[in-house]
């Protein structure tokens, strides 16, 4: 009796092949690194926007209010240290939005006083001294970050996948970027609240138990990183809306988690490992520009590779589903 052999399922897309494709795409279209290069150069050489004075005034007011109950020295030191750290934070870093945004080496950094120097001298400081000014600038910077991020993702996706598949309209891309960003914040908030409660309760019992809970949560977070990593790709690779793109990311994770997780983990190691190299040049030398350019190139390469991987993995899944339906005798729809 001759049994019909099922067609062999091809292996899923390779990580190295996707990274190589991303490298080739950016190498042949070097202008793709322009936005991250200009963004980091602006944060490096431009003025620094600080809310340190406002935060210091709030801390002093809180200490004055609590004068009836003298604070322990450790708490006072913690508050004063937080003022110093907060004063070095560049509020313009809010231009770096997530999950869609322009990658940056300089954003959300807390430089030492020596790193506030540039080749042109000490950075000019713009101080935010009112709550309303702080809120207004934060909203404006986040909106500007969404605009820049959607343009950057759109450019890279078109370069990686072609205009027929990935050229989403600019207005639609911006709107869906805003929706996916808000959806991401809501999801992270829903996840963070029970985590904080669990760790807090564990801390009341034992610090060791709290550390164990944090380690377990960190281990389990691996299963959440992949859906968030590919969350915006459906918008720019398939012209989907934000909700459908989020659902597509969850489906991709459900069926390809070991491989997709390894891809995300590899890109994370590559990015963080090279960031140590890009941060070697001091802020007051022009060699810093070399680090910024290197970071822009690698970040754009990884984004282009992720679009290639997302497309190829989606095609591989369709092939697997089609072969599974044929094996079960279920008629397949012609694309």
Image (cartoon, grey):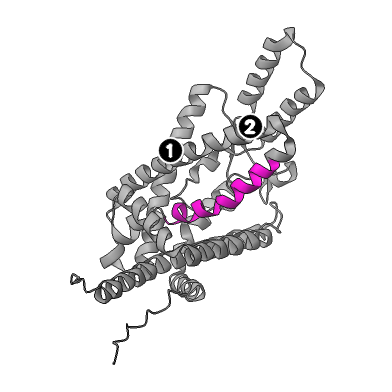
- Using the image, determine if residue 201 lies above or below residue 14: above
**In the displayed structure image, the side of residue 242 where residue 32 appears, left or right:** right
**In the displayed structure image, the side of residue 264 where residue 75 appears, left or right:** right
Position of the N terminus, as image quadrant, is bottom left
Say which of 82 and 56 sits in front: 82
Position of the C terminus, as image quadrant, is bottom left
Image coordinates of residue 46 in percent, x first then y, are: 57, 45
Residue under the image location 43 percent in, 38 percent down? 186
Say which of 192 and 58 sits in front: 192
Say which of 258 and 232 sits in front: 258
Image coordinates of residue 115 in percent, x first then y, are: 71, 46
Reading the image, the residue beneath label 2 is: 200
Say which of 298 and 39 sits in front: 298
Which residue is situated farthest in the bottom direction here? 1
Which residue is situated farthest in the front direction here? 1
- Find numbered disc 1 in the image and state the secondary structure of the residue it sits on: helix
Prevailing secondary structure of the magenta residues: helix
Reading the image, the residue beneath label 1 is: 186
Toward which corner of the image does residue 334 lie, by quadrant?
Answer: bottom left
**In the displayed structure image, the side of residue 73 where residue 147 appears, left or right:** left
Residue 297 appearing in the image? no
**First of labels 2, 1 by sequence position:** 1
CB atoms of marks 2 and 1 within 8 Å: no
Span of residues in magenta: 211-230
């Amino acid at each position: 009796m001759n049994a019909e052999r099922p067609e062999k399922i091809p292996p899923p897309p390779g990580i190295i092949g996707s990274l190589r494709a991303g490298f080739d795409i950016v190498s042949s279209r070097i202008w793709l690194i322009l936005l991250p290069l200009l963004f980091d150069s602006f944060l490096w050489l431009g003025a620094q926007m600080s809310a340190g004075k406002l935060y210091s005034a709030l801390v002093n007011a809180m200490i004055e209010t609590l004068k009836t109950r003298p604070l322990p020295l450790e708490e006072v030191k913690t508050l004063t240290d937080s003022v110093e750290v907060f004063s070095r934070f560049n509020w313009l870093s809010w231009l770096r939005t997530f999950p869609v945004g322009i990658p940056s080496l300089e954003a959300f950094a807390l430089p030492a006083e020596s790193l506030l120097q540039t080749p042109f001298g000490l950075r000019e400081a713009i101080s935010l001294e009112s709550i309303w000014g702080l809120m207004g600038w934060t909203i404006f910077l986040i909106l500007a970050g969404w605009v820049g991020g959607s343009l950057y993702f759109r450019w890279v996706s078109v370069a990686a996948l072609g205009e027929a598949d990935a050229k989403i309209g600019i207005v639609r891309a911006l709107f869906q970027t805003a929706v996916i960003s808000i959806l991401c914040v809501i999801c992270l908030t829903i996840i963070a609240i029970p985590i904080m409660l669990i760790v807090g309760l564990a801390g009341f019992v034992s610090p060791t138990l709290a550390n164990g809970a944090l380690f377990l949560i960190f281990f389990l977070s691996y299963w959440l990183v992949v859906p968030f990593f590919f969350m915006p790709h459906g918008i720019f690779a398939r012209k989907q809306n934000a909700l459908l793109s989020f659902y597509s990311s969850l489906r991709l994770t459900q069926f390809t988690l070991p491989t997709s997780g390894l891809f995300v983990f590899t890109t994370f190691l590559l990015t963080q490992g090279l960031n140590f190299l890009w941060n070697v040049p001091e802020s007051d030398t022009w060699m810093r520009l070399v680090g910024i350019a290197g970071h822009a190139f690698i970040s754009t390469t990884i984004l282009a590779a992720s679009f290639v991987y997302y497309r190829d993995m989606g095609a591989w899944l369709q092939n697997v589903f089609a072969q599974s339906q044929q094996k079960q005798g279920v008629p397949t729809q012609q694309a």
